[in-house]
Amino acid sequence: MTLEHFDMLIVGAGLSGIGAGFHLQKNCPGKSYVILEGRERSGGTWDLFRYPGIRSDSDMYTLGYSFKPWTEAKAIADGPSILNYVRETARENGIDRHIRFGHMVKSASWSSEDAAWTVEAERGPEKEKVRFTCNFLFMCSGYYDYDQGYTPEFQGVDRFRGRVVHPQKWPEELDYSGKRVVVIGSGATAVTLVPEMAKDASHVVMLQRSPTYVVSRPAEDGLANWLRSKLPPKLAYGITRWKNVLLGMAFFKYCRAKPEKAKQMILQGVREQLGSEFVKKHFTPAYNPWDQRLCLVPNGDLFDTIKEGRASVVTDHIDTFTEKGILLKSGKELEADVIVTATGLNLKVLGGLQLSVDGRQVDLSDTMSYKGMMYSDVPNLASAFGYTNASWTLKCDLTCEYVCRLINHMDATGTRQATPRLKDGTVEEEPWLDFTSGYVQRSLDKFPKQGSKKPWKLYQNYALDIMAMKFGKVDDGVMEFAKPSAPARGEPERLAS
């Protein structure tokens, strides 16, 4: 079997993978790379999810790339617009020519002697085994299971005569016009689905076990649109991006410092729309703001739909599914023709990649995360993972820039292996994420740990990360550099540019 060799192998052709290709081309122009994508299309999340109303829950001035201005009027953008933005970025920069579709990466083994990864993938529907080697492996495969979402074990689900669907596997042919719909859940997907489905359904019920914080925001950023009419696109985009970053950081800090005041401020916004009694029953969570991610509703569309009577909210527990719908613990039965289980995602560490270093299997739950992107004792491997309290791409852009700095440092020093080593005995283990959301808690034991101090600590703070990743030392005493004895591989095969 002929092995193709690349300087960098990127896994995933979604928002992060396309960004990684751009940063590598810009900052390490002499390096060859390939992007392996398991599916047959690029776009990742924004191509996979097809449910009605799919949109971002972050503004596009921070979810967009640092290098490509978002120029559409809507700041809270729909899925197809975001998908077009990602693919346009790939086309404009020739990144699309580096993508190999239908390549599902399964395993990677590191050899310190060769300073190289051997990556094995399954190609096409026949799952033909193919192999590649690379000097650096960059995982941009997201954090959840692309094969299936999370659905709890509901008693009696087989008795229901209607249709049950999960948003992650939305059937194209599903017609819910004039039908009764129950959406189970109260997270970002549920609050997106309810107002959108209510446009055609006879009525939509959002059935929640417990309330979530919901915040209304304008779909368009008036200042951003004004700036774009007066200034060059990149300058206008940069100002808006920093404005939104700083506002987001300030609000998160306020929520953590004064949770009760933040709670009342959020709830007051909903009270003005729906009234005190309704908010007390259906929109007052038991936890503090930002213990879980806030839900965003553009222009208050969810509240308007409820006020107009096209949707309603029920806060209760499910006893069992019935032939006609759902029987609740309170004894009430919700009749439905379609039930949507917007019950969340299954998290998956590095897309389920099987890792080994010098013949030793690596269990990532035994490692510690370095700067939120690399792993203790695992050489030349990084992963793109965004913020939980801000836009995904803010952290991914910084990660890409840091990886390029690391590669250029190795070139400049004649080293070929970079490994984070935990040598400080005073660093204590902490959970990877300080988040109470169910989808995080269900999978936290499978993820790496974080440490009690830098560079092992995840601060979830863009300003601190800029200082650490753009301006901090690469050779920081924690990152160990080495030059294996075996000679470097010959001229790698390069893709047309």
Image (cartoon, rainbow, N blue to C red):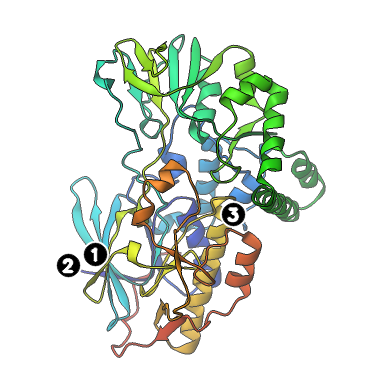
Give, as a three-letter code, the residue at label 1: Arg
Q: Residues within 10 Å of mark 1 (few under 14, many from 20)?
A: some
| Image coords of residue 320 (percent x, y) | 32, 19
Circles 2, 1 touching at the beta carbon (< 8 Å): yes
Left or right, 82 with respect to 300, comes to left
* 2 or 3: tag closer to the N-terminus: 2
| SS assignment at label 3 | loop
Q: Which residue is mark 1?
A: 131
Residue 161 vs 494, above or below: the answer is above
* 3 or 1: tag closer to the N-terminus: 3
Residue 65 is labelled as 3
| Image coords of residue 348 (percent x, y) | 35, 51
Mark in front: 2 vs 1: 1
Residue 206 can be seen, yes or no = yes
Q: Residues within 10 Å of mark 2 (few under 14, many from 20)?
A: few
* 2 or 1: tag closer to the N-terminus: 2
Circles 3, 1 touching at the beta carbon (< 8 Å): no
Task: Work out how far the residue at label 3 is from the one at label 1, CA to CA, in angstroms.
Answer: 31 Å
Left or right, 400 with respect to 416, comes to right
Q: Residue at x 44, y 88 (%)?
A: 414
| SS assignment at label 1 | strand
Task: Work out how far the residue at label 2 is from the one at label 1, CA to CA, in angstroms.
Answer: 8 Å
Circles 2, 3 touching at the beta carbon (< 8 Å): no
Q: Nearer the viewer, residue 460 or 90?
A: 460
Q: Residue at x 40, y 59 (%)?
A: 98
Residue 1 is labelled as 2
Give, as a three-letter code, the residue at label 2: Met
Give, as a three-letter code, the residue at label 3: Tyr
Q: Quadrant of residue 26?
A: bottom right
Residue 287 vs 156, above or below: the answer is below
| Image coords of residue 113 (percent x, y) | 27, 84
Residue 28 can be seen, yes or no = no
